[in-house]
Image (tube, rainbow, N blue to C red):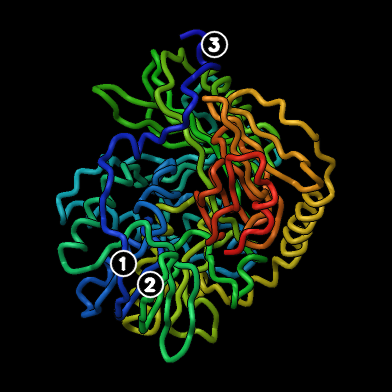
Amino acid sequence: MNIDEQKNFKKTPESYWIASTETTNYPTLNEDINVDILIIGGGFVGISCAYQLLNEGFKIAIIEANKILQGTTGYTTAKVTSQHGLIYNKVQSQMGKELAQQYADANQNAILEIKRISEENNIQCDYVHQPAFTYTQQDKYIKQIEDEIKIATELGIKASYVDEIPFNFPIKAAVRFDDQAQFHPRKYLLALANLVQNQDVQIFENTRAVDIEDDNGYTITTAQGNKITANKVIIASHYPFYNKHGMYFARIYMERSYIVAIKAKEQYPGGMYISEEDPGRSLRSQSYDNGELIFVGGEHHKTGQGKSTVKHYETLIDFANSLYTVEDIPFRWSTQDCMTLDGLPYVGNFTANTPNLYIATGFQKWGMTNSTASSIILKDLIVHGKSPWQDVYNPSRKTIMASAKNFIVENYNVAEQLLDGKLSQLPGDADLKPGDAKVLKVDGKRVGVYRDRQGNLHLVNTTCTHMGCELNWNSAEESWDCPCHGSRFTYEGKIISGPAVRPLRASNDVNTIDKLFTEDY
């Protein structure tokens, strides 16, 4: 496979995790129900929470806006590791050793919990022990790596210093964590979903929550208009769609990153790797068709703010070619991560004043262990009223104030994107090739126009239905993406991912543009 052929790789992105597992067919909720605990979101956290709560005597339901385990869970690198960049030095410096110890314990225990659950339930999920490495090619990170090793070791992690890794590029330093792992997340979680359903947990797909009312318990309204009453609610929808409390829209921002899965002539040397500096680079392997795939990842940017998203894939292919003789690129995909102000997740009570409303979000790029840890934390809070790891994950932690500078920077960026979108100059014609899109000004109005492979035009109102930001076109995934809070929509206006709960106003008739701006919802 020569370089020109690689640049013309499969046009449609496809995740290996989704392609290699069966699709699900859980029912859509079509009636009102009452439960003890409602879990909103059928990803890693939602399924894991149901499993942790199985034997506690609760009536539980899970609702998923699309198909379970096809959101962020289906687009990960699936590294089961407590090595989250150089995080322990940062946490101990900003929050103290006690909270650094909580974070280390939570994630080290999560590695063991995934292994325990898979073994006890005979889940064949390609679980393999691997060392994890964070490396640098820059002198300025050497001291940080040395400090990370010292602190991680004091926290009970098997950490060591190395000055080379088995790839054809030099490094300045790296930290190695032993007793880490990798696995197939959908094989693991689809088995768990089947297990919890067999024990009377109700799972509903294509059932989007659009509102929550708090009145002696919670009433959740779905997009179909059905009502779910629940004593307790866990919001595990990746980005929280609920805006009435907590100011999460001002405390989270979204990033996209990319993966190409290659088949190479050479064998992968083992281990999981990630660079500390930008541009980010991530490497791991996965068994595949009596051989292996090598996952080459990185190229992160804020959602809706990547100037040419296809270029990110091409850059990763160039990097892969510098390391291997690439024979094929059978899969490629991108993912979306919730980033928090201080780099730590928000897990616990939604606010200090909502004792029966819970949240788990903001895993940065480390959702495998953090999702598992979150399920244990939330189970403990619901059943026992406390968790040994609650303080470091607390969404209302006082130490978030130490990130006030990040709060200002991120929200300035949101405001900048909002204003730039409203004021930008737009072309006035739709000279589009099939597969292309533009934001045009038609009769003085902003209209997103996409031309499909058959030559038909699809028009949408490009104002995000979440908080009114103007959407940008994502050429790699052919979607309309919000640069403010990360909502994504198809070219037909359907929601791909929230926090938006309403689709875009759309039309395939160029003579009905006014409908895009006057139709009521």
Give 51 or 245, whichever is nearer the viewer.
245
Q: Which residue is mark 1?
A: 30
- The residue type indicated by label 1 comes to Asn
Residue at point 42%, 70% (across, down): 225
On the image, numbered disc 2 is attached to which residue?
A: 226
Q: Quadrant of the C terminus?
A: bottom right
Instruction: Say above or below: 247 vs 138.
Output: below
Amino acid, disc 3: Ile
- Residue 84 appears in the picture as rendered: no
Front: mark 1 or 3: 1
When asked about the image quadrant of residue 227, the answer is: bottom left
Secondary structure state at the residue bearing disc 1: loop
**In terms of sequence position, does the residue under pointer 2 or pointer 1 come before the other?**
1
Looking at the picture, how far across and down is residue 492, in whole percent? Answer: 54, 43
Q: Are marks 2 and 1 in contact (CB under 8 Å)?
A: yes
Horizontal side of 511 relative to 203 (left or right) equals right
Q: Does residue 311 show up?
A: yes
In the image as oriented, which residue stretches furthest toward the top? 2
Between marks 3 and 2, how big is the CA–CA gap? 52 Å
